[in-house]
Image (cartoon, rainbow, N blue to C red):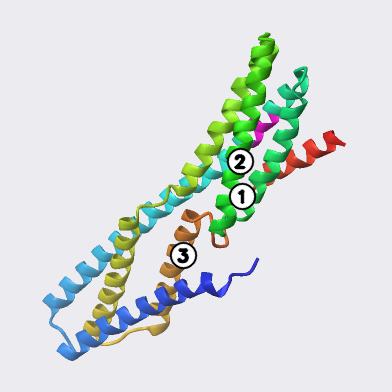
Amino acid sequence: MFPTTTEVLPGLVLFALLVLAHEVGFRVARRRGARADEGERSETSTLQGGMLGLLGLLLAFTFAIASQRFDTRKQLVLDEANAIGTAYLRATAVPGGEEVADLLRRYVDVRLEGAASAGNPHGFRRAVTESERLHAAMWSRAAALARANPDPLRTLLLPALNEVIDLHEKRLTAMRNHVPTIILVLLLMVSVLTMASLGHAAGVSGGRSMSTALTFAMLVTLVIMVVVDLDRPERGLIRVSQQSLQTLRDGLHRGER
């Protein structure tokens, strides 16, 4: 999968902003004078080290948050596949549960359609609505079976379906659970100020390595874009694998045949 223009453009804008901040810092320092005394150099060096440390801390912090939530979303896919598989097995073992089993097969298809259309708000809402309709249909049928003949086998189907419904809501919540916007804004501000301080330090010292500045700006941009990509599962290059649900779907449809 290759990145689209929409996905690349924010990274290019961020990179340009960091380079611009470095250039502004450098020019401000040069305008104040070609050289600085030893005291100013020491103060600039201390400020530069502090800004770099703060930037590193924020990058590590936000990356850890985004990575943890990405792992949570992956685990929920596996949990949902296991829950649907368990409910399906119980439905096939219950006399009269064939309709619930058919609904579960349809449900897996809808869940995969929803994951594929995560970047399309209209398609995603349609998949969520269909999922909730299937919840009601499955629960209604299983509850009717349990009331008609409340033996242990039929009542075991209800907790399995309840787990399927709960995991649907957990996955929706996990998709909406992002790194707080204020943290991303703070990370952007610190990144810009750090590049400006590096440029200022280069101006105070009387020279700079532009290739080093560009490399650092590129690395910071890449890390921030990876954080945002991990944190936004509905778009970008890093997607949560649906392999568990796909494998389950293949198995259920083979069983149908």
Q: Nearer the viewer, mark 2 or mark 1?
A: 2
Residue 220 pos. (x, y %): 41, 68
Report if residue 55 is visible in the image: no
Q: Is residue 120 magenta?
A: no
- Label located before the other in sequence (2 or 3): 2
Q: Closer to the camera, 226 or 170?
A: 170
Residue 241 pos. (x, y %): 63, 49
Q: Label 2 vs label 3: CA separation?
A: 32 Å
Magenta: main secondary structure:
helix
- What residue sits right under mark 1 in the picture? 114
- What residue sits right under mark 2 in the picture? 131
Q: Closer to the camera, 121 or 72?
A: 121
Residue pictured at 39% horizontal, 52% vertical: 179
Report if residue 38 is visible in the image: yes
> In the rendered view, does 55 fall on the left or right side of 172?
left
Residue 131 pos. (x, y %): 61, 41
Residue 37 pos. (x, y %): 12, 82
- What residue sits right under mark 3 in the picture? 225
**SS class, disc 3:** helix
Q: Nearer the viewer, mark 2 or mark 3?
A: 2
Type of residue at label 3? Met
Image height of 6 relative to 202, above or below? above
Task: Give the magenta range.
Answer: 81-85
Packing grade of label 2 (10 A; few <14, some 14-19, many >=20) is: many
Q: Are marks 2 and 3 in contact (CB under 8 Å)?
A: no
> In the rendered view, does 129 fall on the left or right side of 232?
right
